[in-house]
Amino acid sequence: MIDFETARHNMVESQVRPSDVTNRGLLDAMSSIAREAFLPAGRKSLAYMDEDVLIGHFGDDQVARYLMEPMPFSRMVQAADVKSTDLVLDVGCATGYSSAVLAQVADSVVALEADEELAATATQTLLDQGIDNVAVVTGGLTEGYASEGPYDVIFVGGSVPEAPQSLLDQLKDGGRMVAVVGQGAIGEACLFVKRGDVVGSKVVFDVSVPPLPGVVRHAEFVF
């Protein structure tokens, strides 16, 4: 039988801390949240591997969905500088692990998921884990969830070809969004910060993560 508590400790000590993740609240959250609870029964043993873990295939198009590798996930959350008073939008929450971690370091989380089956799983799993400051909602991931915004932080749980303007528009003044921009083998984890009507960005680190479903690059017209 797998000792998940030891595996969780080893994940933090061998994957997260060595990646320059020093935020105490985040480290505590990743040390306490049962990552295996957010995977189907046949994949729980893979919960603490240092790679993206397939959750399953969902929707009419049978799109593959993953639990993001601990290293890029933790570095992205740290880059967002989530505070205990923040309202966070978690875009593409899948089964809810990212929302569970964010809920430990923020005031509240709106967890957005396009697939109704995944959203139902996330709702039940978060309830089972005793996490009561996350609201799971369904809708298109590119559109965000403006009715509950604006947000202090937006976490994008997969790579996108470009930062969706609709999500940036839902940031508060001073709000931050983290997303991996670029798909395939090359991507950049970027931090976007909104000041007034202007959004600045910087690359935090290079990484490749699975794509967020339903997000496409806007067509470029040539005249």
Image (cartoon, rainbow, N blue to C red):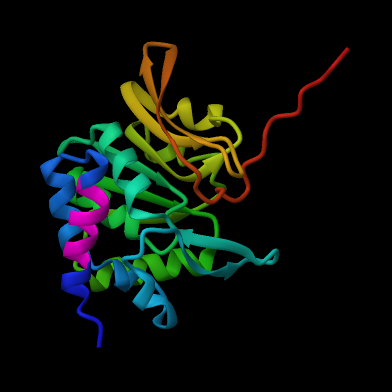
Residue placed most toward the observer, 139 or 147? 139
User: Is 12 located above or below residue 57 in the figure?
Assistant: above
Residue placed most toward the observer, 126 or 14? 14
Q: Residue at x 34, y 27 (%)?
A: 176
Left or right of 105 in this view: 47: right
Quadrant location of the C terminus?
A: top right
Residue placed most toward the observer, 139 or 158? 158
**Location of residue 219 (image quadrant):** top right
Picture coordinates of residue 36, whole percent (x, y): 31, 72
User: Number of numbered discs present?
Assistant: 0
**Location of residue 11 (image quadrant):** bottom left
Q: Indicate yes or no whether the magenta region holds residue 78.
A: no
Q: Residue at x 22, y 45 (%)?
A: 18
Picture coordinates of residue 189, whole percent (x, y): 43, 34
Q: Indicate yes or no whether the magenta region holds residue 9.
A: yes
Quadrant location of the N terminus?
A: bottom left
User: Is 146 located above or below residue 140 in the figure?
Assistant: above
Left or right of 93 in this view: 11: left
Which is the main secondary structure of the residues drawn in magenta?
helix
Picture coordinates of residue 79, whole percent (x, y): 29, 32
Q: Residue furthest right?
A: 223
User: Is 63 located above or below residue 24 in the figure?
Assistant: below
Picture coordinates of residue 184, whole percent (x, y): 61, 44
User: Is 131 located above or below residue 98 in the figure?
Assistant: below
Q: Residue at x 43, y 16 (%)?
A: 199
Tell me the magenta residue range: 8-17
**Location of residue 177 (image quadrant):** top left
